[in-house]
Amino acid sequence: MAAREAQGIAQDRMTRYCQNRCGPLQLTKAQKIKDRWLVDFDSPGRRFTVTVDNGGNAKVDVWDKNS
């Protein structure tokens, strides 16, 4: 899987996860670690990392900026 494909899957997953409640999102970084892509997004109040595996499965992790 290429970086662009992983970013597309991550963007789709974030759209479904947020449903217009997260505020404006900005893709900040994508990096490949072993067989997974970590795609980072930034919003005004939170940071998100979407883990995308080679099968196209994606998982969202959220960090609060204010803590």
Image (cartoon, rainbow, N blue to C red):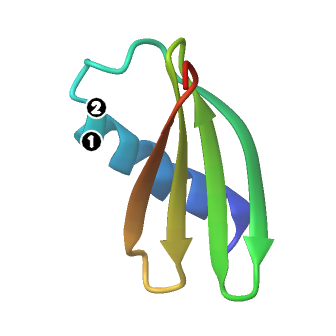
Left or right of residue 23, residue 37 in this image: right
Left or right of residue 20, residue 33 in this image: right
Instruction: Tell me the tag on residue 18.
Output: 2
- Residue 15 lies, with reference to residue 33, above or below; the image says above
Q: Tell me which amino acid carries mark 2.
A: Cys
**Residue positioned 76% across, 71% down in the render:** 32
Q: Can you give x and y, in whole percent of width and height, for residue 8 in the image?
A: 51, 51
Instruction: Tell me the tag on residue 17.
Output: 1
Tell which of 58 and 56 is nearer to you: 58
Q: Quadrant of the C terminus?
A: top right
Dot 2 surroundings within 10 Å: few (below 14), some, or many (20 or more)?
A: few
**Residue positioned 54% across, 84% down in the render:** 54
Q: Are marks 1 and 2 in contact (CB under 8 Å)?
A: yes
**Residue positioned 54% across, 12% down in the render:** 44
Distance from the alpha carbon under mark 1 to that under mark 2 = 4 Å
Q: Give the secondary structure at mark 2.
A: helix
- Residue 62 lies, with reference to residue 66, above or below; the image says below
Q: Give the secondary structure at mark 1.
A: helix
Tell which of 63 and 41 is nearer to you: 63
Answer with the quarter of the image where residue 55 lies: bottom left
Give the farthest residue toward the front: 67
Q: Tell me which amino acid carries mark 1.
A: Tyr
Answer with the quarter of the image where residue 57 lies: bottom left
**Residue positioned 63% across, 53% down in the render:** 39
- Residue 35 lies, with reference to residue 49, above or below; the image says below
Instruction: Tell me the tag on residue 60.
Output: none
Q: Can you give x and y, in whole percent of width and height, for residue 14 in the image?
A: 38, 41
Left or right of residue 17, residue 14 in this image: right
Left or right of residue 42, residue 60 in this image: left
Q: Quadrant of the N terminus?
A: bottom right
Number of dots carrying numbers? 2
